[in-house]
């Protein structure tokens, strides 16, 4: 393979953080970055690498991001300067429409056409559209930036390159976390070098993320793929195991990605926001959304739920707002009715929690608080796992097939044979379940332990993990699940 | 906890860079490590750090344990009765081997090996062996794939122990829905290499739906006269909707036996059984980690 082929965009080979290609480019990047003394040089190096990374993931569709960046940059500057409220509103609306129109075209055009065809009875027309990786994430980031400038919560970027850096910054550009400009722009302006502690802990965070992704998520994902691809071939116990395997896969995949992203960003000297707080320990669905994909849930709260009226317009309106917000959140994940239903059911569950639950308190209080917390945890966990079926299924027929097969083949001998034939899978799932339910401090303890170890030990751990990734990977590179959103 | 971090950011970055470079070097070195561990002249293990070996070790994810403890439904029974020889296209019929050996009536030592579908074939094969003077040994590795049999030494050991004169492979069920079938080519070739010059037939997986190419790939490597395509058979399944029932297994083996006699490159005596065979000598392998 020629060097130019390595540098060129290849849609079959996304530049995921666990791939050897990324590792190679990152080594070169670190080699250059290590010797840069000035903030301006570091800024330029990171910006160039980010653009290259985004190009490797999307090819020439980097142009869509540039278009959004140009539109946002000028809209925000003009909004900040203008005292004419109508003009400010028009600029805000124009910027949002630009961002959303690109998102709708790339992500939802075929979905809309398919549903129009379904309603009209015409044969569906499918457009050959490439979905740029990360477009859902940067669309939300761009909207929040312009809205924050409009609200006066954020100073506009001083230069276009500064804003472009915010959008395209490689640790978060393709799969989040959904960062806010008010958090990132000040750090971009300073571009201070990372402290020695940050470098060590950043590497530790990367190690933890790689382990989550490569050793747990990808492995259990092989099994859940089998189940969800051909559910009618499997018995109820196998399907149930597959559904729980997917619940572990999506958590370890996405939180592992986030760990790597935050770790890499720490190496560069920029702190990104946390995205997970042991969500499977949640004791209510409200609590779950305070722990799962926190950057998305807070975004939905700040830019959809509260503008819709939040809880200020009465209880019924609050429930409707929750439902509508989660419907949009579901649709944001993908152009499919399964995502819409998934979001809608989460919205309904949130409304029910507000109606019958603890009114948003994270843990039960008063008599029998502990047993109620355990009961709440059990119910919440299984509700979330059940709803993952809709999230993972290709279409509603798969959901039907999964649910239809769940009741079949519940025989003790079959379950014993299944567990004995899949000992490694069961063991890894048990470890995964233990880790996902462990207190949050376990992860930070591991990171600090890694950071405080002597350099040769850290290098050794890194080698062992990298070798595990080489040996455990499937025949195809498994992209992070949230790349598709 | 005291963090033993380097004193300056510059030194921290240098350490980070050295860690990355060291990792690259170590991965390169490991990828070239192919060592036999021999103690006192006794070979204990082969040390290799490559992707194929681990893929074989973690293949349990794809395993399909035989959970067939539920009798077939009446509808299944009807389907068994309707099962027929696999349909051959004109092109396939025209491809009947030109190098076909004459029917060998000598007693054979038959080794049938593969995934859990071996269990469906072995009982009826035992009947054939008892009626035709053959002996047999069945090795069923639940849910195994061509990777496992191609990479691991299990087949070498079985051949060394059983000294078969004829081999039947029933493998590929777990690879029906592969996205990248071509990735299995080297493993299929490895299995064929392990069998050396011994006569064999490969019984294709009993499809329950259109496969993504594993049948065609195996057939292209072993040849049409060594590959029995099972995908045309209507076989009753256990409640897992996958494994053929015991009765369907008999029908399946009848079809395979007829094909070996009439159409395979290396026909052996497999006259229709006149008596029931003993429980087959067998070894069932579970998961390998």
Image (cartoon, coloured by chain):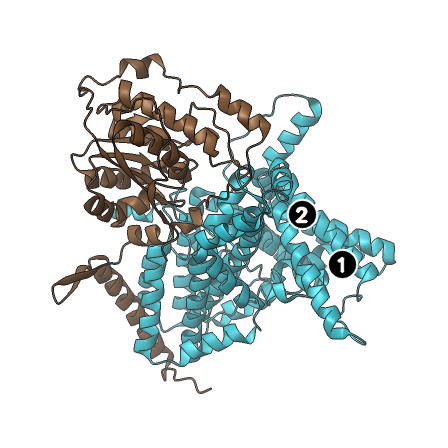
Chain colours: A cyan, B brown
Mark nearer the N terminus (1 vs 2): 1
Give the structural element (helix, strand or loop) at label 2: helix
Instruction: Decide: few, some or many residues near mark 2? Use Cα within 10 Å; few <14, some 14-19, many ≥20.
Output: many
Q: Is residue B12 left or right of residue B134?
A: right
The answer, for residue B6, to whether it is visible in the render is: yes
CA distance separating discs 1 and 2: 21 Å
Question: Which residue does the image show at 37% across and 58% down from the upper left?
Answer: B289
Say which of B200 and B178 sits in front: B200
Residue B168 - label: none
Relative image position of residue A430 (x, y in whole percent): 51, 62
Q: Chain of mark 1?
A: A
Q: Quadrant of residue A293?
A: bottom right
Give the structural element (helix, strand or loop) at label 1: loop
Q: Which one is in front in this view, the residue at disc 1 or the one at disc 2? A: 2
Relative image position of residue A415 (x, y in whole percent): 54, 51
Residue A342 - label: 2
B46 to A332, vertically: above or below = below
Q: Quadrant of residue A59?
A: top left
Q: Is residue A401 left or right of residue B84?
A: right
A324 to A148, vertically: above or below = above
Residue assigned mark 1: A306
Relative image position of residue A214 (x, y in whole percent): 42, 58
Say which of A92 and B95 sits in front: B95
């Amino acid at each position: 393979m020629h060097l130019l082929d390595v540098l060129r965009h290849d849609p079959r080979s996304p530049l995921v953080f666990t791939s050897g290609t990324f590792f190679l480019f990152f080594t070169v990047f670190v080699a250059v970055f290590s010797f840069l003394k000035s903030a301006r040089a570091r800024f330029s190096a990171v910006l160039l690498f980010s653009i290259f990374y985004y190009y490797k993931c999307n090819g020439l569709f980097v142009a869509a991001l540039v278009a959004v960046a140009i539109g946002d940059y000028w809209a925000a500057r003009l909004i900040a300067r203008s005292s004419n409220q109508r003009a400010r509103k028009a600029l805000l609306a124009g910027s949002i429409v630009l961002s959303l129109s690109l998102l709708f075209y790339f992500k939802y055009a075929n979905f809309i056409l398919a549903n129009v065809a379904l309603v009209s009875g015409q044969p569906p027309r499918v457009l050959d559209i490439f979905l740029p990786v990360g477009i859902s994430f940067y669309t939300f980031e761009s909207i929040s930036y312009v809205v924050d400038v409009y609200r006066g919560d954020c100073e506009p970027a001083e230069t276009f390159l500064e804003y472009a850096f915010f959008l395209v910054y490689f640790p978060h550009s393709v799969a989040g976390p959904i960062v806010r400009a008010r958090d990132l722009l000040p750090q971009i302006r300073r571009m201070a070098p990372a402290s020695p502690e940050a470098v060590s802990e950043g590497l530790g965070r990367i190690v933890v993320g790689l382990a989550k992704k490569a050793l747990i998520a990808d492995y259990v994902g092989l099994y859940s793929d089998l189940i969800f691809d051909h559910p009618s071939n499997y018995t109820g116990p196998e399907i149930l195991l597959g559904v729980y395997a997917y619940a572990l896969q999506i958590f370890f995949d996405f939180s592992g990605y986030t760990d790597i992203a935050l770790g890499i960003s720490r190496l560069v000297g920029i702190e990104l926001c946390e995205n997970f707080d042991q969500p499977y320990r949640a004791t209510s669905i409200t609590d779950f959304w305070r722990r799962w994909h926190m950057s998305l849930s807070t975004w939905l709260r700040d830019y959809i739920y509260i503008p819709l009226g939040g809880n200020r317009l009465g209880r019924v309106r609050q429930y409707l707002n929750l439902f509508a917000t989660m419907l949009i959140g579901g649709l944001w994940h993908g152009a499919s009715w399964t995502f819409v239903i998934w979001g809608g059911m989460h919205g309904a569950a949130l409304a029910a929690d507000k109606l019958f639950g603890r009114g948003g308190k994270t843990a039960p209080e008063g008599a029998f608080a502990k047993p109620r917390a355990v009961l709440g945890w059990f119910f919440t966990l299984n509700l979330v796992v059940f709803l993952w079926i809709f999230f993972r299924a290709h279409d509603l027929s798969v959901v039907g097939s999964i649910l239809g097969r769940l009741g079949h083949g519940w025989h003790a001998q079959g379950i014993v044979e299944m567990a004995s034939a899949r000992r490694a899978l069961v063991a890894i799932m048990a470890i995964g379940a233990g880790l996902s339910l462990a207190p949050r401090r376990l992860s930070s303890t591991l990171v600090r332990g890694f950071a405080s170890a002597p350099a040769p030990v850290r290098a050794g751990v890194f080698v062992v993990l990298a070798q595990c990734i080489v040996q455990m990977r499937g025949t195809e590179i498994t992209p992070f699940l949230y790349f598709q959103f | 906890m005291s963090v033993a971090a380097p004193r300056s950011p510059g030194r921290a970055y240098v350490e980070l860079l050295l860690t990355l470079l060291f990792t690259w070097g170590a991965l390169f070195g490991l990828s070239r490590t192919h060592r036999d561990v021999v103690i006192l002249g006794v070979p204990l293990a082969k040390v290799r750090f490559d992707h194929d070996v681990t893929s074989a070790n973690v293949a349990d994810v794809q395993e399909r344990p035989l959970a067939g403890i539920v009798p077939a439904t009446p509808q299944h029974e009807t389907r068994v009765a309707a099962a027929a020889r696999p349909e051959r296209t004109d092109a396939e019929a025209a491809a009947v081997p030109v190098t076909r050996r004459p029917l060998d009536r000598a007693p054979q030592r038959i080794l049938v090996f593969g995934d859990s579908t071996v269990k469906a074939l072995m009982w009826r094969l035992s009947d054939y062996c008892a009626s035709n003077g053959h002996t047999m040994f069945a090795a069923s590795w639940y849910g195994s794939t061509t990777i496992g049999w191609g990479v691991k030494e299990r087949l070498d050991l079985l051949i060394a122990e059983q000294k078969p004169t004829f081999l039947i492979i029933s493998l590929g069920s777990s690879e029906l829905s592969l996205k990248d079938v071509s990735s299995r080519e080297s493993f299929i070739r490895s299995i064929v290499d392990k069998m050396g010059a011994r006569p064999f037939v490969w019984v294709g997986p009993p499809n329950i739906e259109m496969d993504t190419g594993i049948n065609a790939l195996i057939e292209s490597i072993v040849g049409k006269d060594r590959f029995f395509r099972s995908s045309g058979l209507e076989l009753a399944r256990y409640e897992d909707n996958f494994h053929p029932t015991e009765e369907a297994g008999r029908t399946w083996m009848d079809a395979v036996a007829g094909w070996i006699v009439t159409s395979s490159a290396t026909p052996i005596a497999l006259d229709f059984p006149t008596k029931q065979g003993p429980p087959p000598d067998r070894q069932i392998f579970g998961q390998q980690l």
